[in-house]
Amino acid sequence: MTENDSRYPGADLEAALARWLPRQRWFAAKGHTVTGVRIVLRQALAEGPGFGAEHVLVAVDFEDTPEQIYQVPLGYRSHLPDELTPWTVATPDDAGHSVFVYDGLRDQEIIGLYARSLSSGKPKGTVDLHTVPGSEFEMDVRGRPLGAEQSNTSVVLGERLLLKMFRRLTLGINPDVELHLALSEVGCRSVAPLRAWIDADVEGVRTTLAMAQDFAANSADGWAMALGSIRDLLIEGDLRADEVGTDFAGESYRMGTAVAEVHSDLAAALGESQRPASGLAAAMSRRLEAAAAEVEELAEFVPAIQARFDEAAAVGPVTVQRIHGDLHLGQVLRTPERWLLIDFEGEPAKSLVERRHPDTPLRDVAGMLRSFDYAAHHSVREREPDTATAQREFRAREWAERNSAAFCDGYAASSGSDPRDIGALLRAYEIDKAVYEVVYEARHRPAWLRLPLNAIRRLSQD
Ligand SMILES: Nc1ncnc2c1ncn2[C@@H]1O[C@H](COP(=O)(O)OP(=O)(O)O)[C@@H](O)[C@H]1O
Ligand SMILES: O=P(O)(O)O[C@H]1O[C@H](CO)[C@@H](O[C@H]2O[C@H](CO)[C@@H](O)[C@H](O)[C@H]2O)[C@H](O)[C@H]1O
């Protein structure tokens, strides 16, 4: 297939993508009506009889929200194997299109094309590849998609590298690459080293498209591990968290030390400064106002939340630095050796400028404390209600408190500073995160909305 391809005209591709994009897990504008799709980059990767592949970027217009740009590597085949049919964008039709169009990142052959580009150091056309010095790639590695869809799409190359293709593009450098690069340069042990990244000029701005880092084989994510621990605890509800065989506190402690190490390495690599807590609290109040305008269930909590933010504002000057920005149990991987932090993109709903703003490390600590609460209470809600439900709620809370304390202990032991010492600010961050979660759940998983709302009640009114 070539740039001005006659077999699949741009206008038809744009129309097919307008129908397909809103159904994707990573589509960030759920609930907004797409009014048009415009191709902004179309780069042939392979072409031959019955098979083609293209790297495509599109700008999506909406009725009621600003344009968004998405990355959609596409495959074209005259015969689509069964395993690729769930990823169909368009089928052959009466209008004379003889090929299926599908999500290229589900096709091992197309993933292999990206792998070869990385290993040869020669991406196609206007797309640039940057290799971190000392990183080598094998020429002909095979690729496979990585499990479930998330905010982006990741593929494993030769079981050695993970290539993450950003889906919704934010014009500029992606903090995931920026922070992984900084951490890799100072030899941080608690991240998977960055090996390469891909960028291109998009609408006149140099923009990150993808990154490759070491693949941590045989790892488990913190969310799955935490759920395993809680499952055992909730079977009867009569044992305390420290009495069940799958007590998680030791892991939470080590996770705390890993997060502290990353914070210390980020400060060493990118610096620290001072900021009045009043400015941080004012930003939280603005976010609260916007969230309450979007999710009406928040309204009754606004005065109590604001009182907590006012307490945080009185804390005085605090040290700020670059942080992870969206830390939760799904963002930590337990390898056989240690915990690794992944996905430094920051909260997807924030602008790039906001995500790159220095903040206190307490935001990340609070993110993990919120996640212990999520894991515990989500597990209770997964079970059919019965006479033991109240007891399970009690145990779940105990589990969250035990693991939060262990995490903070580990953090304090590694960093020399205990996050609980500035309790008013830590609590404000927990509430701020729960407010973000209320909006996130209302947009993506309304059935989960009660989880952050219950936490807000507890955190703002205790
Ligand atoms: N370096 C890695 N090694 C192994 N698995 C990884 C690695 N980085 C991420 N993963 C896995 O890929 C999934 C998606 O990664 P993440 O960076 O969180 O992507 P997204 O931006 O799509 O949320 C994670 O949940 C984790 O299971
Ligand atoms: O897609 P990302 O992983 O970057 O993060 C977004 O999605 C997360 C949900 O997967 C969301 O996290 C919330 O749910 C988690 C459980 O699924 C829980 O552990 C977190 O504490 C809770 O915030 C995250 O906030 C969002 O940015």
Image (spheres, helix red, strand yellow):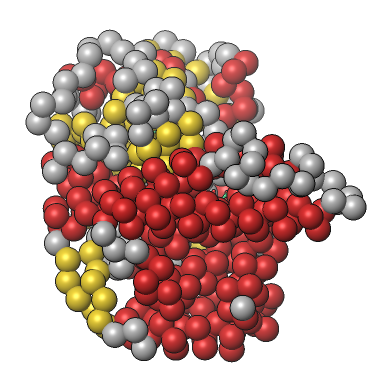
Residue sitting at the far left: 133
Quarter-of-image position of residue 225: top right
Q: Residue at x 48, y 31 (%)?
A: 220
Q: Give the camera-side residue of 234 and 459.
A: 234
* Image quadrant containing the N terminus: top left
Q: Give the camera-side residue of 63 and 181.
A: 181
Can you say whether 184 is above or below 317 in the image?
above
Q: Residue at x 51, y 45 (%)?
A: 249
In the displayed structure, does residue 235 sit left or right of residue 225?
A: right
* Image quadrant containing the C terminus: bottom right
Residue 36 seen anywhere in this rendered image of the structure: no
Q: Residue at x 37, y 51 (%)?
A: 410
In the displayed structure, does residue 427 sit left or right of residue 415?
A: right
Q: Give the camera-side residue of 196 and 11.
A: 196
Residue 271, percent from left and from top: 14, 62
In the displayed structure, does residue 410 sit left or right of residue 242?
A: left
Can you say whether 206 is above or below 20 in the image?
below
Quarter-of-image position of residue 300: bottom right
Residue sitting at the far right: 387
In the displayed structure, does residue 4 sit left or right of residue 227?
A: left
Quarter-of-image position of residue 180: top left
Residue 460 seen anywhere in this rendered image of the structure: yes
Residue 171, percent from left and from top: 29, 56
Residue 211, percent from left and from top: 28, 37
